[in-house]
Image (cartoon, rainbow, N blue to C red):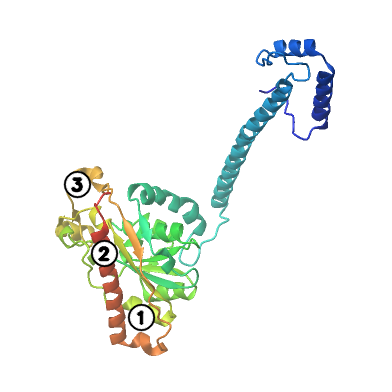
Amino acid sequence: MADAKVIPFDDDRSRSASAGRQARRRGAGSRRAGAESSAAGDVHPLPGATGRDAPAAPPRRDTETEQDAARQDTPQERRPAEDDGGLERRIASGLAFLRRRLTGEYEVDDFGYDAELTDQVLLSLLRPLYEKYFRVEVKGIDNIPKEGGALIVANHSGTLPLDALMLQVAVHDRHPAQRHLRLLAADLVFVLPLINELARKLGHTLACTEDAERLLSQGELVGVMPEGFKGIGKPFSERYKLQRFGRGGFVSTALRQRVPIVPCSIAGAEEIYPMIGNAKTLARLLGLPYFPLTPTFPWLGPLGAIPLPTKWTIQFGEPIPTDGYPAEAADDPMLMFDLTDQVREEIQHTLYKLLVQRRSVFF
């Protein structure tokens, strides 16, 4: 194939050579036609055919065969070059990323959020868990605004806060604008070694009013799970029963910044670590809000920390606007109570619908 000559359709030399051969064939007698037929080996003229009736297809067919082979070979010859180019670009991008990390030529915001590290490394590490292990299905992603501040309020469960991380991947990967979700986390997250640094790099910040209002005023998408440890550490017997949403601080924040509240329901996270007990004494010694006992942990050691591969569904509800309320509404306790209850009921009702619709915990 390396020595094959590609003959394009518009080659003048090919046309002139073919025309000369056809002229010689038309001027030849039946004896030359018979010789050409014998030489071709695969063409048999009908009995009584004259020189003019002798088929002239074999030479033309040879040319068409060469052209067909050329057309088939061309993409195959180009594909390795294209693959090499894509691989070279990925390698160059990776080397440039490493150079920026080593030389410190990258930016983090005032909260410690590292957008480049999150996009290229941290979300890439979480994505196989999101896509292959929990097989997360996302509904209602269009209810999240394409730009500007918004507050996403979700239920919290699963013994370990994997639901918060999967929610962050879902918003970035499924939203048309690939928005980043800035999660509000508990104090405990920022005192644990290594976890503290990773949380800051991912864009998480302390669950306080000041940080939340600042992010919303900058047009960021902020996520909050008002159940806190009461939700994530509840026993398996109370799964999918929302705990109290605190005093409605998230509603006050949304009213002050006049941003919409988007309810979010996460189904499937309750079963990843079925919590059948709580070693409270051990939890107090370790300074933890609870110490879970599951069917696999701590009995199987490190293997018991592997979550069960449940099938998840994350559904975003219709946004609840807050820009129609007066400025003093944020200080109205009755209004905050009503809005808090409205958001909680929306999340709970959606959870019940998702549980009725699912066929299995794992499939």
Q: Residues within 10 Å of mark 3 (few under 14, many from 20)?
A: some
Q: Is residue 333 above or below residue 168?
A: below
Q: CA distance from mark 2 to mark 3?
A: 30 Å
The kind of secondary structure element at disc 3 is loop
Quarter of image, res 191 = bottom left
Q: Which residue is painted at 19% across and 58% down in the image? A: 283
First in sequence: mark 1 or mark 2? 1
The quadrant of the image that shows the N terminus is top right
Using the image as rendered, state which of residue 42 and residue 354 is in the foreground. Answer: 42
Q: CA distance from mark 3 to mark 1?
A: 41 Å
Q: Is residue 320 above or below residue 111?
A: below
Q: Which mark is residue 252?
A: 1
Circle 1: residue type? Ser
- Residue 186 rendering spot, x and y as whole percentages: 32, 66
- Residue 293 rendering spot, x and y as whole percentages: 17, 53
Residue wearing tag 3 = 296
User: Which mark is nearer the camera, 2 or 3?
Assistant: 2
Residue wearing tag 2 = 353
Q: Which residue is painted at 45% across and 74% down in the image? A: 216
Q: Residues within 10 Å of mark 1 (few under 14, many from 20)?
A: many
Q: CA distance from mark 1 to mark 2?
A: 28 Å
The kind of secondary structure element at disc 2 is helix
Circle 2: residue type? Lys
Q: Is residue 300 left or right of residue 343?
A: left
The kind of secondary structure element at disc 1 is helix
Whether the residues at callouts 3 and 1 have beta carbons within 8 Å, the answer is no
